[in-house]
Image (spheres, rainbow, N blue to C red):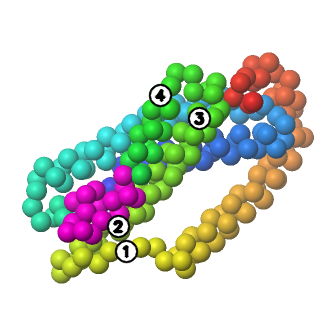
Amino acid sequence: LAPRFLTSAFVSGPAFIIIAIQVIRRAIGSNFGNGPIRTLVNIMRVTILINLLMVVSEVFVEFYTGGSHTSAAHYLYFGIHGHNALVPWIWSSVAMTVIAALCLMCPKVHDHAWILNTACVLAFIGIWIEKGMGMVIPGFVPSTLHEMVEYTPSLLEWKIMAGIWALGLMIYTLAIKIAINVFRRSPLATKATASPVNAQPLAS
């Protein structure tokens, strides 16, 4: 479980940072960040494959061994006795992660911003679903008494989640504003704008 958390963090984290870098440099009109983006993409290329391998390994072990303890995995991926509320969630997560991995494997993904952004968004959402609806909830279905009590997020829970995200993004935005002001006053800002190396299609 711990390696899966670490691996997925090295997928969703860089994906978020790549999107943030592109948004920031559009806002300030600077071409900085191509080097870090390439490094983050290389990290994602490795970790997203490792994450998929761990998911496949876990599913293989669950279904290969058989027995009553596989009921949670069976419910998650295929449903049990008509109870299949989580099936669309997990298969959407798998599809998004696989598509993101294929996009990241493109040799010139750095030259196509829309492909890179699509891969980052899909990877981030896919990991978010996997670590929430795909990992926590199935542990309680079926229950310890072998009862099928399905879970669906309520409107209040969606509002709480939106509030947490809003608070986090507000703090992040304030920190970025401070960092941008510092960056504009540094010599690196002039170099990032004037350097022909950074003027690549990714900034378009």
Q: Is residue 202 above or below residue 196?
A: below
Residue at the spot of label 1: 151
Q: Is residue 142 left or right of residue 192?
A: left
Check if mark 1's residue and mark 4's residue have beta carbons within 8 Å. Answer: no
Disc 2/disc 1 C-alpha distance (Å): 7 Å
Q: State if disc 1 and disc 2 touch (CB < 8 Å).
A: yes
> In x, y percent, where is residue 172?
71, 57
Q: Position of residue 79 (x, y in %)?
A: 25, 63
| Residue found at x 41% / y 52% | 92
Q: What amino acid is found at the position of numbered circle 1 in the picture? A: Tyr
Badge 3 is on which residue? 116
Q: Nearer the viewer, mark 2 or mark 4?
A: 2
Mark 2 falls on what kind of element?
loop
Gap in angstroms between the C-alphas marked 3 and 4: 10 Å
Q: Are marks 3 and 1 in contact (CB under 8 Å)?
A: no
Q: Residue furthest top?
A: 196
Please tell me how crowded label 3 is: few (under 14), some (14-19), or many (20+) other residues with Cα within 10 Å: many
Q: Which residue is mark 2?
A: 85
Residue at (64, 24) in percent of width and height: 111
Q: Earlier in the sequence, mark 2 or mark 4?
A: 2
**Label 2 vs 3, first from the N-terminus:** 2
- The percent coordinates of residue 200 (x first, y second) are 73, 23
- Please tell me which of labels 3 and 1 falls first in the chain: 3
Q: What span is in magenta?
A: 74-91
Look at the image and tell me in which quarter the N terminus lies. Answer: bottom left
Q: Tell me residue 4's x, y (percent).
A: 37, 50
Residue type (three-letter) at the residue carrying disc 3: Leu
State the CA–CA distance, disc 3 to disc 1: 34 Å
Q: Is residue 89 visible?
A: yes
The kind of secondary structure element at disc 1 is: loop
Residue hosting label 4: 105
